[in-house]
Amino acid sequence: MTPDNPKDLPPPPPLAELERPALFLDLDGTLAAIEPRPEDVGPQPWRTRLLLELQDRLDGRLAVVSGRTLEDVDRILEGAAPAVAAVHGLVRRRHDGTLVRTAPHPGLARARQQAAALAARHPGLRIEDKGLSLALHFRFAPDLEPLVLDNARRIAREQGLKLQPGSMVAELTTPGLDKGGAVRAFMAEPPFAGALPVFVGDDVTDEDGFDAVRAEGIGVLAGPARPTRAIRRLDGVDAVREWLSAMLLEGTRG
């Protein structure tokens, strides 16, 4: 990926200055701080309230786009986001509540066995089964990264799965929509159609989302500067919260 200028990206303009923005927000590392274990992330009253108020202010033009399962997103956000793309887009709940699910790839069954065998040999490796994907977390054993990535590539190749690297994780997924495809699908539907897409995310898994909005919208990297397809940047979760909250103070034209 080739950044415009990864070390000097300006912050995004205030949301209130944008004409009919449509917000697409990653969860971990964007709306919630990264925790050692995914299950350690839980609801926060400020976040639930903020999302509900933004939904109202934006006339529903807000979606959460996450690698987590739909059930986990709803648990953490207390159902404050009607529109959600989960498991990197393989499960998508439209704003009207309609669910679109990709069928699990048959190769996942064998991949589960192979991943379990790998974890048995390396206790620092943790396997998260999302039904449509398997996440191999090595946050507790970062020295395992080369081994995990090599094995994940091999398993993906053998079983016909897609490899989705992330921050301290290698995910074996059913082929299908990624985050960018999910954003494009939302933008073809009400209430997002015709709006200005703004995608905010922190991880390499969010680069597909930045790609999806780059032609007509704004990609915002949340976190330290790095090579990215985003064109704007915020310092992290706290800065994202402040940027989103400012809209509620200033109002919007959309």
Image (tube, rainbow, N blue to C red):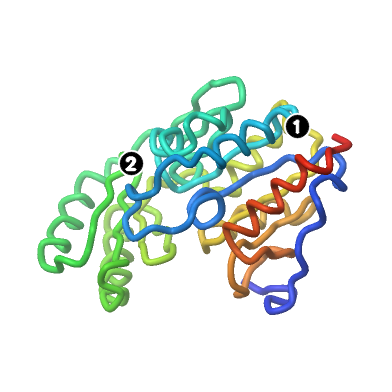
Disc 1 packing (10 Å; few <14; some 14–19; many ≥20): some
Residue 216: x and y, percent?
A: 80, 50
Residue under the point 56% across and 61% down? 202
Res. 75 image quadrant: top left
Which amino acid type is marked by label 2? His
Using the image as rendered, state which of residue 41 and residue 210 is in the foreground: 41
Residue under the point 17% across and 57% down? 114
What residue does disc 1 label? 57
Q: Is residue 231 above or below residue 16?
A: below
Residue 46: x and y, percent?
A: 56, 41
Using the image as rendered, state which of residue 138 and residue 89 is in the foreground: 138
Q: Locate the N terminus and report the quarter of the image it occupies.
A: bottom right
Query: Does label 2 or label 1 sit earlier along the sequence?
Result: 1
Which amino acid type is marked by label 1? Arg
Residue 110: x and y, percent?
A: 19, 49
Between label 2 and label 1, give the one nearer the viewer.
1
Helix, strand or loop at label 1? It is: helix
What residue does disc 2 label? 105
Helix, strand or loop at label 2? It is: loop
Q: Locate the C terminus and report the quarter of the image it occupies.
A: top right
